[in-house]
Amino acid sequence: MARKKEVPFLRGKIENWAAGVIHALGTINFLFDKSTEPYASLDVILEYFGTKQSTTSQKSKHIREMFKLGHFHPDFTIQSIEQDNPFNNMQIIDGFIVPKR
C-alpha cells in the first residue's frame, strides 16, 4: 500500500487499516465460512482490533478494490483454499471455459 501514489493508510486509525487488511484477506480466503479451516468470526477481529464493523468493512473493500483482490487470487490465496479451487481443472479455449480433460 505504501507504493501507491495516494497512500490511504496515512489517514485514519492504524487499527482500522489493520483490521481492514485482515478482513480483506479473510474474505478472499473464506475465513468467515464455518465450514472451512481456518475459521474466525468477524466479531473476533473487531474485538481484537477494537474497531467497528462498518469501518472495518469499508477499509476492507477499499483494499480489495485497490489490489483487485478476489476469491482464488494467485498471490493471496492460502494453500488449503488453492487446492480446492474449482478452476484448477479448467482451461479457456476459444473464449470458452472447459475441463482440462
Image (cartoon, helix red, strand yellow):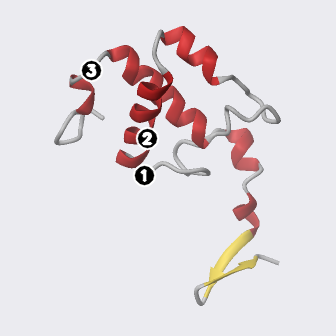
Q: Quadrant of the C terminus?
A: bottom right
Tell me which numbered mark, 1 or 2, is placed earlier along the sequence.
2
Mark 2 lies on residue? 61
Look at the numbered disc 3 and give the secondary structure of its residue: loop
Which circle marks residue 12 in the picture?
Answer: 3
Q: Secondary structure at mark 2?
A: helix
**Kind of residue at badge 1:** Lys
Q: Position of residue 36 (x, y in %)?
A: 78, 35
**Measured from the top left, where is residue 12 in percent x and y?**
26, 20
Q: Nearer the viewer, residue 35 or 52?
A: 52
Separation of residues labelled 3 and 2 (CA atoms): 15 Å
* Residue at x 59% of width, y 90% of height: 94
Q: Which residue is at 39% across, 48% downward?
A: 65
Q: Residue at x 76, y 76 (%)?
A: 100
Mark 2: amino acid = Lys
Q: Position of residue 98 (x, y in %)?
A: 73, 80
Residue 53's place in the image compared with 75, above or below, is above
Which residue bears the numbered disc 1?
A: 68
- Residue type (three-letter) at the residue carrying disc 3: Gly
On screen, residue 48 above or below 37? above
Q: Is residue 6 above or below residue 23?
A: below
* Along the line of sight, the residue nearer the viewer: 26 or 73: 26
The residue shown at (42%, 52%) is: 68
As drawn, is 93 to the left or to the right of 100? left
Q: Are marks 3 and 2 in contact (CB under 8 Å)?
A: no
Picture quarter containing residue 8? top left
Residue that lies at the very extreme toward the left in this rendered image: 5
Q: Is residue 99 above or below residue 2?
A: below
Q: CA distance from mark 3 to mark 1?
A: 22 Å
Q: What is the number of the mark on residue 86? A: none
Nearer-N-terminus badge (3/2) = 3
